[in-house]
């Protein structure tokens, strides 16, 4: 409990910064005296709140404006962040609920499950969750059947495809390392899919489940000693997202091709990614918030899946680690980083 109280002190300081930057995270009641109460959107994050906003959160904010939902003018937007500490997510969620949100916005399975556990009445809108059915957040994609709806992607199905694409760049690869946040249900499912697909592609898989920055650093040490031929990184908005630059730099330093379902990791220096447009999903999530605030029931509001999956190849990384990208892959890529 003492650790959480200290954590809340950090959050209060961050909230003050958000106010300075124009946010309205947990603003005291006396500051918000208004003739009529604005709709209140609660935004629950597992990862830290950054200013300026991450590309994903910026896309969501722009999406809100497109729907006429302007924080500070037509709606109130309040934040709650566990600062990347899974043990605090439930308490942070309870703090957020005390602020009386009309809808809760979540990203990732950790925040989604925390919100679902905390309330069965307040509508919850997912911005990007890998497999909401698999983690028990909803009954089905077509009919969620509860208070959770939103935008999702099924990353598990894409894991074998990502490995196939990576093998085109490293046809002689024999050893595959897979890293994921073991606290994340979606990441765990995707990792299992990648590990299961590896032998069919002639790869010997190594599992590296993680739960902290320290464990990631330890994994880097082990991988430096054994040096896999490919490094597969699961899609998730927590530990991996926060350390995408470190992971990409490890691949560059050790000359190991890094493949993932996270375009941002490829932009940071990974070799390639095969992934949906995550900022576009966050922007689309704002439409769901608008629908819910206008009275739509999450129970019958179908979850939307991305229609496009893009292949991004970092040619600068390929050159740096001595990998030749075949012409077929160059022609197929949706974006080349040069």
Image: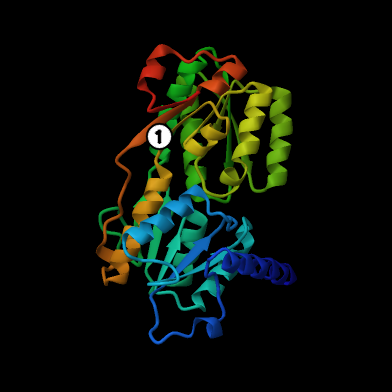
Q: Quadrant of residue 180?
A: top right
Q: Nearer the viewer, residue 270 or 225?
A: 270
Is 49 situated left or right of 63 in this image? right
Which x, y percent locates residue 234?
Answer: 52, 39
Residue at 70% across / 43% down in the picture?
215
Query: Does the image show residue 38?
Result: yes
Q: Nearer the viewer, residue 97 or 63?
A: 63
Residue at 53% across / 50% down in the picture?
184
Which x, y percent locates residue 157?
Answer: 38, 37
Q: Secondary structure at mark 1?
A: helix
Query: Does the image show residue 298?
Result: no
Q: Residues within 10 Å of mark 1 (few under 14, many from 20)?
A: some
Which x, y percent locates residue 43?
Answer: 48, 64
Give the residue at mark 1: 158
- 260 is higher (above) or lower (below) than 256: below
Total numbered labels: 1
- 101 is higher (above) or lower (below) than 206: below
- 323 is higher (above) or lower (below) than 279: above
Q: Quadrant of residue 80?
A: bottom right
- 282 is higher (above) or lower (below) than 273: below
Q: Nearer the viewer, residue 148 or 286?
A: 286
Q: What's the coloring here?
A: rainbow
Is 21 situated left or right of 277 in this image? right
Residue at 60% across / 67% down in the picture?
20
Quadrant containing the N terminus is bottom right
Residue at 49% across / 17% down in the picture?
169
Q: Nearer the viewer, residue 45 or 155?
A: 45
Which x, y percent locates residue 254?
Answer: 68, 23
């Amino acid at each position: 409990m003492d650790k959480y109280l200290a954590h809340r002190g950090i959050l209060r300081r961050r909230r003050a910064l958000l106010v300075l930057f124009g946010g309205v995270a947990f603003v005291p009641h006396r500051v918000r005296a208004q003739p009529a109460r604005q709709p209140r959107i609660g935004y629950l994050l597992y990862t830290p709140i950054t200013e300026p906003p991450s590309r994903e959160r910026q896309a969501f904010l722009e999406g809100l404006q497109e729907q006429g939902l302007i924080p500070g003018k037509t709606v109130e937007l309040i934040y709650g962040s566990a600062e990347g500490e899974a043990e605090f997510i439930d308490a942070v969620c309870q703090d957020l609920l005390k602020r009386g949100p009309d809808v809760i916005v979540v990203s990732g399975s950790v925040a989604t499950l925390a919100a679902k556990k905390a309330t069965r009445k307040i509508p919850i809108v997912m911005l990007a969750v890998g497999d909401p059915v698999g983690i028990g957040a909803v009954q089905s994609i077509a009919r969620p059947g509860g208070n959770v709806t939103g935008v999702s992607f099924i990353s598990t199905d894409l894991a074998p495809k990502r490995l196939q694409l990576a093998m085109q760049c490293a046809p002689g690869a024999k050893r595959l390392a897979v890293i994921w946040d073991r606290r994340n249900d979606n990441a765990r499912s995707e990792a299992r899919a990648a590990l299961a697909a590896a032998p069919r592609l002639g790869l010997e898989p190594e599992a590296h489940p993680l739960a902290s920055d320290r464990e990631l650093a330890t994994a880097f040490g082990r991988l430096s000693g054994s040096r896999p031929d490919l490094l597969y990184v699961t899609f998730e908005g927590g530990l991996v997202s926060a350390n995408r630059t470190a992971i990409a730099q490890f691949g560059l330093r050790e000359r190991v091709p890094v493949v993932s379902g996270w375009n941002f990791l490829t932009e940071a220096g990974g070799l390639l990614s095969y992934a949906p447009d995550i900022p576009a999903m966050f922007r689309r999530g704002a439409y769901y918030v608008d629908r819910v605030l206008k009275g739509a029931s999450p129970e019958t509001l179908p979850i939307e899946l991305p229609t496009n999956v893009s292949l991004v190849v970092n040619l600068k990384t390929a050159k740096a680690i001595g990998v030749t990208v075949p012409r077929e892959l160059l022609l197929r890529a949706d974006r080349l980083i040069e």
